[in-house]
Every structure is written in C-alpha cells, then in structure tokens.
C-alpha cells in the first residue's frame, strides 16, 4: 500500500488584530513531513514575530535532522523567558513523521495534541523530559492509515470563556466534539477547519485569543489523471488517450471535444446529465469507464474560485464539497480525495470557440493556476502538454 501524509491548518486572529500571534510552518522533503505550530506570547505584531521565529527555527532544524535536545536548547537560548510574567516567549508543538507513519512529536506548553485513530479521539503516551528548567513532552509516533494528529494553540481551549462558557472549552469537550462531527475520509485541512469554526462560534465571531488548529493525517495514496482538451495532432488521439487511461488511477475528462474522443476510443458514448445543481456551471456528462466527465473552461474557472477558498487558512467555509455540480465534484476529487494528480493538456484550438472570448491561452492559464493551487495543498502534480 502506497501511503501519503497530508496536513492542513486554520487560524483565527484575536478580534481587532491584523496579525495572528500563532504560526504554522511545514517542510516536506518527500520522505518526512515536519509541522510546527508555535504560539507567541500575547497577540499582535510582537506575538507574530515570536511565533514566526520559533516555528522557522524549529522547522528548519528538525527537518534537517538536528536532535530534539539541540532544537529545544536553541529555542531556549534564542527566546528567553519573559521577565514580567515568568513564562516562555513562545510555546510550540513539533510533529516529524515519515511516509510510513513513524516519527516523533514534542510539545512545550501548548494544549496536549489529540490522537484520532479508528475514528475516535485518544490521548498520546507522552514522556516528560527536562531541558534546563523546561519540561518538554516527547511522543514516539507509529501512525496507521486513517490516523490523525490534531494540535492546537491555547485559543482553542479558551474558546467561549466569559461568553458562552464559564471556563472555556475543556479538552475533553474538544475530543467529544470531534468524535461526534468527524466524518470518515475527511482531509487534515477539513478537520482543522471544522474545529476552528466551532471555536469561532463559541467566541461569537470575536475571538478573545489567537486560535489555530493544525492537523496531520496519514492515508492511502489516490492517483488522478485529468485530461483537458485534445492534442494538436489528431492522428495522435489514440496514443494520447491510451497514455491518459493507463495505470490504476481515477480518470477525469474536462471538455466536450475531449469527452467525445475518449468515448469513441472506449467504444461508448457520452450521456448528458440535464441536472443543473449550479446555474453558473454547465452540467456534467457520463462515460462508462471514466470517473468524472465535465465541461471545460467554465468549469475550470469555477474550480479556481473554489480552490482559492479551500486554500485560505482563515476562511471558515467547510473544506468539504457537498454540491453536485461539475466544479464541486472536480474540487472534491482533486483537493480532498487525490494525493497525486497528472494533467494531460491538449493544445488543440476548439473550433466551437471561434469568435468567443475563450482561447487556448485561457485554458493553459487555468490549468497552470489549478496545478499551482494543488501543489500549495500538498499534492504531487505533473503536467503533460500535447
């Protein structure tokens, strides 16, 4: 089984602040994923600088193979204790895990991370270690497919204090909420957004503290091949389609001409779907042997819009796509389900677009934007032009 690590986070700024005092930094070298969530003392500019320094230093050192002891010592030496309050300038959680789910996590003064396995929240076995006068908790990780690690800043457990709740959202309440609302197969980003959105509700849309939720999930890899347009040389149609269809991956076809030649190659027809779940998006089609068939440029343009909301770390729109229009189905396939995406982009000019403000340049720009957004979402992307 080919495994894949995904991550995602959502942050809420303290009400009235332009900058978030929490910072998440991620490094991925193809084998290990390193995620750091740092929470700077206080809020605003000062906290943002402190959390940025902490997360950057730790992410660089841990991903570079530096020992936990050296990492913690460097942070202690770089960011001394606040003289007024007697507390650290920044708290942090560091997750370092490989493609097989093996690795470690260490935590300093952030709320204890939550382990989700078999769809239920659990506690990690944390071992305390003393570094000078600081206690850092270290956890050996051995994740299996479907497991999540959910880590957070203290804005999560403070949610609702003095507003809806007297004493904030206790950690056991957070776990109960995730147990109830976690849906099978949710991405790491969707889980982070789910929890952050609940915190925002408890704060009545005015967070009393910077609030960040970051999640890591290990899952089975899902490959998707997507064909956008036919090749320039019509004599190469069969070669081009055979290459698009090879391998054990999900298959997506975008565009009317592409759908026609793929259906012909498969000795079948395109069946039109006359439902219009979204009036801005043309209806989908159906081809036997193809997982999803959509219209071309208009659907891709809508997909760009959906992907930019999906990538926002501050947008609280659920990171799941429940609508049944072509763009939403495509967004779900590429951004939620896929881990590896291959684009097969034909550069033939569509005669049906003559005289319309749609040209090959627009299609190529859309594919370029979508592929960049997929990479930002942590996907492995390849683009082939024909």
Image (spheres, rainbow, N blue to C red):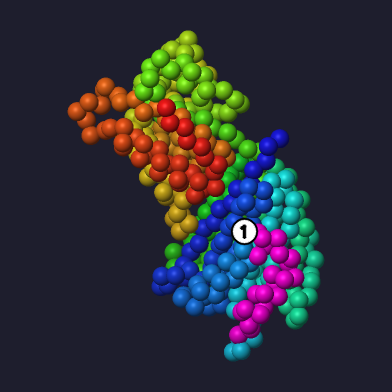
Q: Is 355 part of what is drawn in magenta?
A: no
Q: Answer left or right for 33 relative to 165.
A: right
Which percent across, then down, holds residue 171?
66, 64
Residue depicted at x 78% and y 75%:
130
Q: Identify the main secondary structure in magenta.
A: helix
Which percent across, then down, holds residue 67?
74, 65
Residue 114: in sight, yes or no? Answer: no
Tell me the residue that label 1 is attached to.
Answer: 35
Q: What stretch is highlighted in magenta?
A: 61-82
Task: Report the label total.
Answer: 1
Q: Nearer the viewer, residue 87 or 348?
A: 348
Residue depicted at x 67% and y 40%:
3
Instruction: Answer few, some or many: residues within 10 Å of disc 1's Cα (few below 14, many 20 plus, some between 14 and 19).
Output: many
Which percent across, then down, holds residue 272?
38, 19
Image-quadrant location for residue 262: top left
Quadrant where the N terminus is found in the figure: top right
């Amino acid at each position: 089984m080919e495994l894949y690590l995904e991550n995602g986070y959502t942050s809420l700024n303290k009400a009235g602040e332009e900058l978030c005092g929490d910072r998440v930094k991620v490094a991925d070298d193809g084998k290990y994923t390193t995620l750091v969530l740092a929470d700077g003392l206080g809020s605003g500019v000062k906290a943002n600088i402190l959390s940025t320094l902490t997360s950057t230093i730790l992410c660089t050192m841990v991903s570079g193979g530096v020992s936990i002891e050296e990492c913690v010592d460097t942070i202690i030496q770089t960011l001394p204790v606040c003289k007024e309050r007697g507390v650290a300038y920044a708290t942090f959680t560091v997750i370092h895990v490989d493609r097989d789910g093996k690795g470690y996590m260490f935590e300093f003064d952030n709320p204890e991370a939550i382990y989700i396995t078999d769809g239920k929240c659990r506690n990690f076995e944390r071992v305390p270690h003393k570094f000078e006068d600081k206690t850092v908790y270290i956890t050996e990780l051995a994740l299996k497919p479907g497991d999540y690690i959910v880590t957070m800043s203290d804005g999560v457990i403070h949610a609702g204090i003095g507003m809806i709740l007297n004493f904030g959202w206790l950690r056991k309440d957070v776990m109960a909420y995730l147990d109830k609302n976690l849906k099978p197969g949710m991405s790491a980003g969707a889980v982070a957004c789910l929890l952050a959105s609940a915190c925002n509700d408890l704060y009545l849309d005015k967070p009393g503290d910077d609030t960040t939720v970051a999640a890591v999930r290990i899952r089975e890899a899902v490959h998707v091949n997507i064909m956008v347009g036919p090749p320039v040389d019509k004599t190469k149609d069969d070669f081009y389609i055979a290459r698009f269809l090879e391998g054990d991956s999900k298959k997506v076809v975008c565009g009317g001409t592409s759908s026609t030649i793929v259906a012909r190659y498969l000795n079948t027809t395109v069946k039109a779907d006359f439902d219009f779940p979204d009036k801005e998006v043309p209806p989908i089609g159906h081809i036997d042997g193809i997982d999803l068939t959509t219209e071309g440029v208009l659907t891709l343009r809508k997909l760009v819009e959906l992907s930019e909301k999906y990538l926002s770390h501050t947008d609280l729109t659920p990171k799941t796509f429940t609508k049944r229009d072509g763009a939403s189905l495509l967004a779900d396939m590429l951004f939620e389900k896929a881990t590896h995406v291959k684009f097969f982009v034909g550069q033939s000019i569509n005669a049906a677009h003559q005289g319309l403000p749609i040209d090959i340049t627009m299609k190529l720009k859309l594919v370029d934007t979508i592929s960049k957004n997929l990479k930002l979402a942590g996907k492995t992307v390849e683009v082939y032009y024909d």
